[in-house]
Amino acid sequence: MKLKLFPLRLVAYPSKIVPLHIFEDRYKLLINECISTNSEFGIIYQNDKMTASVGCTVKVHKVLKRYKDGRMDILTKGNSLFKLIDKQIEQEIVTAKIELFSQSADDLVPFEKLRDKYLQVLMSIGLSENLDRHLLKSSSFELLEYIDLMPELELEIISIGSEEKRIEVLDNLYTELLLKLNKSKKNNSLLN
């Protein structure tokens, strides 16, 4: 499959909402094309030293603002993970041959336990309103909402090919996070 890419210093993954300010002419063209054809483009992590070998297809979810000079503020939403097979520059846009990751249905029990731990994290950081909507989440990627991770860690998470393994990694991460949050609360209560 062929896909136009938008290399950025951030990581997209399924269900993640990514706000973008589009100002370069080449990306104005790309985004306008995607809007008019209701098509996807790919976000792939890139820094000064490397371009990731995995990324995520995204669609323009909402145009927040259009400026007179053609710039725009948009929200995109991640759809499917992909592996980069080959890339080239076409009309100043990186175009890639990609392969979508296959999604497998895994056991629900570890996911439900992870979702419970995710809810504990949210409550520990003071996000206790509208918890019901989080009960409807059904993939590990959805359990990253409100969790601000470094792009390198997000890249590591999207590079994991199995939902079961991602659940295991996130379970360890949330266990560690809850321990730190509880320790911090304990230390704060001792100071008061």
Image (tube, rainbow, N blue to C red):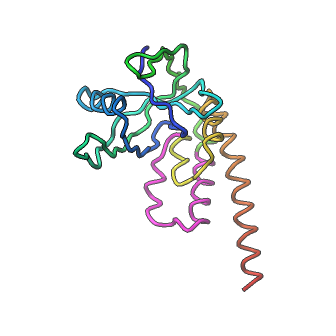
Q: Residue at x 47, y 43 (%)?
A: 16
Q: Residue at x 50, y 37 (%)?
A: 12
Where, by quadrant of the figure, is residue 120 drawn?
bottom right
- How many marks the image carries: the answer is 0
- Is residue 189 left or right of 8 when viewed as pictured? right
Q: Which residues are magenta?
A: 112-139
Q: Is residue 59 magenta?
A: no
Residue at the bottom extreme? 192
Q: Is residue 83 above or below residue 177?
A: above
- Is residue 156 left or right of 28 when viewed as pictured? right
Q: Residue at x 43, y 33 (%)?
A: 79
Q: Main secondary structure of the magenta part?
A: helix
Quarter of the figure that contains the C terminus: bottom right
- Is residue 25 left or right of 122 when viewed as pictured? left
| The one of 163 and 185 positioned closer to us in this rendering | 185
Where, by quadrant of the figure, is residue 2 drawn?
top left
Q: Position of residue 144 (x, y in %)?
A: 55, 47
Where, by quadrant of the figure, is residue 24 drawn?
top left
Q: Position of residue 161 (x, y in %)?
A: 62, 26
Quarter of the figure that contains the N terminus: top left
Q: Residue at x 45, y 26 (%)?
A: 5
Q: Is residue 80 above or below residue 131?
A: above
| The one of 22 and 133 positioned closer to us in this rendering | 22
Q: Position of residue 186 (x, y in %)?
A: 75, 74
| The one of 125 and 40 positioned closer to us in this rendering | 40
| The one of 181 and 49 positioned closer to us in this rendering | 49
Q: Is residue 134 magenta?
A: yes
Q: Position of residue 128 (x, y in %)?
A: 51, 66
